[in-house]
Image (spheres, rainbow, N blue to C red):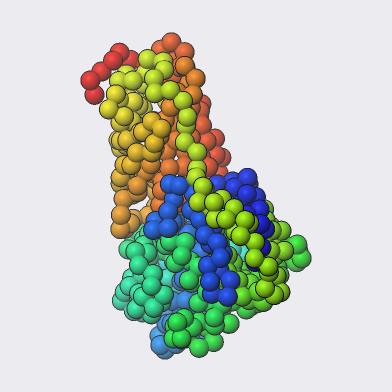
Amino acid sequence: MSSAALAALVDALVDLGELHSLMVVRHGHVVAEGWASPYSSDRPHLMYSLSKSFTSSAVGFARAEGLLDLGDLVLDHFADVAPADPDPNLRRMRLRHLLTMTTGHHDDPSDEVFRTPEWARSFLALPVAHEPGTHFVYNTAGTYLLAELVQRLTGQRLLDYLAPRLLEPLGIEGATWEQSPQGYDVGGFGMSATTEDIAVFGQLYLQAGAFDGVQVLPDGWAAEATAWQVPNGDDPDSDWAQGYGYQFWRGRHGSYRGDGAFGQYCVVLPELDLVVVTTSACREMHRELQLVWDHLLPAVAPGELPAAPDESAALADRLARLALPIPVGSAAGAPVVDRVMTFEPNDLGVRTARLGSDGLLTIEHVDRTLVLAVGHGELRSSFVEHDALRPGGRLSGSSTDHEVLAAGAWVAPDVYELSARVIGGPHAVTLRLAVDGDRVTVTGEVNAVFDDPVVGPLVATLGPVSSG
C-alpha cells in the first residue's frame, strides 16, 4: 500500500471533521494506526450502531446452539408482553425480519419506543403497516428486541454471553454496553470498545469467522450475515442503498460494514483483503466513507511496491502527531473567576455557573449539579455520573461514569472559551463566554448531535465574588 496515499487519507479525514482514530489492516497486518490525542489505543470508544453487528453475532451463536431459529415468529418469544389483539402483520413478523430491518414498520419506531419504560412491550404495540419482509426501514428498536431475546433465552447479559464465544477468543477486554430501563444490554447501540477491538472483529468476518486458526463464529455465519439479504434502495452511488444483511450494511466496491453514528466505521473489503476502522465525530458520514474510497482504493497495489522510506516515515509522523485542539489564550481575563453567573430562564435548564480559582466549573442545573475540572493549556479530568450528561435520558446500567476532559482559556480579554469532551465517545461541547460588565452571553456548539448543534445564546448576570 502507498504510504503517501494513506497520509493523504488521514489529512482528508482530519479536514472533514474530528478524526479520533484510524486503523488500516491489510492481509492481517496493521499498516497504519493512529489516535488523535486525547484519544488513545487503550480507551474504549462509544460505537453507536456499530454495536448492531455484535448483536447479530450473538444471534448467530444462539441459532447455532439451538436456542432460536431465524424463522421463529417474534410473538412466540414475546407472548408475555404482546398486545391482546396483535396486528395481523405483527403476527407474521419473524426474527429474520428483525435482523434485516424489514419488520414492516413504515417509519423507524425507535424514538417512540425508547421514550417508554418497557421497550419490548412498546415495540409490539405499534402498528405494522407493511407485510414483514417487504419494506426496509432502519429500526434500532428491532435490534433491541433481538438483544433482549438472546438475554431472555440465555439468562445472561449480552456482553456475558458473548464473552467466552466472541470477545475472549479475539482478545477483547473491557468492552461495555449500556442497558435499557429493564436492565437489558440495548443491542442496537451503546457498546464501547477500542479501535483495535473493532478491527479484530472486522478481520474475523473477513476470515469467514476464523481467528488464529480457530473457528470462532458458527460455520457459514460470517458469509450469511454479510451477504445481500434485502434491498434497501436503488441509488448506485450511495453506500446506504447497496443492500442489507444481518445488521451489516452492504457497500460499494464489494464492501460490507458495521457503522455507527458520527463515523464509527468497520469497513471490510474482501477482494482487497482489507479492513478499515475509524472512530470520529463526523456529521457527514457519507463524505467520510467517500474519502476512504477516494484515497484508500488507489493506495492498494496489486503487487509489491518499491520501498519508499521517506513516505513511510512521513506517514508514521503524521499519525503520531494527530491531536484535537484545545483553547489557546491567557489564563486571566475579564473578572469572572469566583463569581456566580445567574442565568435567565433557558431551554437547557441551566440556573447558575461558577468558574472557581481552583479551576472547578460548577454548573447548577434544574435537577442536578455538575462539577468539571478545567485546565489551562492542558486537559483536566473529571468523572461525571452516567445520567448527568443525559438530562431526561432513557438509559441506565452503565458500568462506569463518564470521564470528561476540559480546558479553557481567555481567547480575548473579554471572551473565555471552554472545551469539554466526553472521552469515552465522540461528543464534545465548545462554549464561549462573552463578558460585558456584569453581563455574560454564552454561545457554542456540540460537535456530534442528532439535532441542532448550536448552544445558546444564554444570558447571565455576574454576582459578587464568592468563596464557593
Residue 307 drawn at (x, y percent): 64, 65
The residue shown at (34%, 78%) is 164
Quick one: quadrant of the N terminus?
bottom right
Q: Is residue 170 above or below residue 433?
A: below
Q: Is residue 274 visible?
A: yes
On screen, residue 123 versus residue 299, left or right, reads left
The residue shown at (52%, 48%) is 322
Q: Is residue 455 visible?
A: no
**Total marks placed:** 0
| Front residue of this view, candidates 346 and 61 | 61
Q: Is residue 295 above or below residue 392?
A: below
The residue shown at (50%, 51%) is 320
Q: Is residue 38 above or below residue 232?
A: above
Which residue ends up furthest to the left in the rendered image?
467
Residue 353 drawn at (x, y percent): 35, 26
Give the quarter of the image for residue 194: bottom left
Quick one: quadrant of the C terminus?
top left
On screen, residue 448 versus residue 106, left or right, reads left
| Front residue of this view, candidates 359 and 432 | 359
Residue 440 drawn at (x, y percent): 44, 19
On screen, residue 338 versus residue 309, left or right, reads left
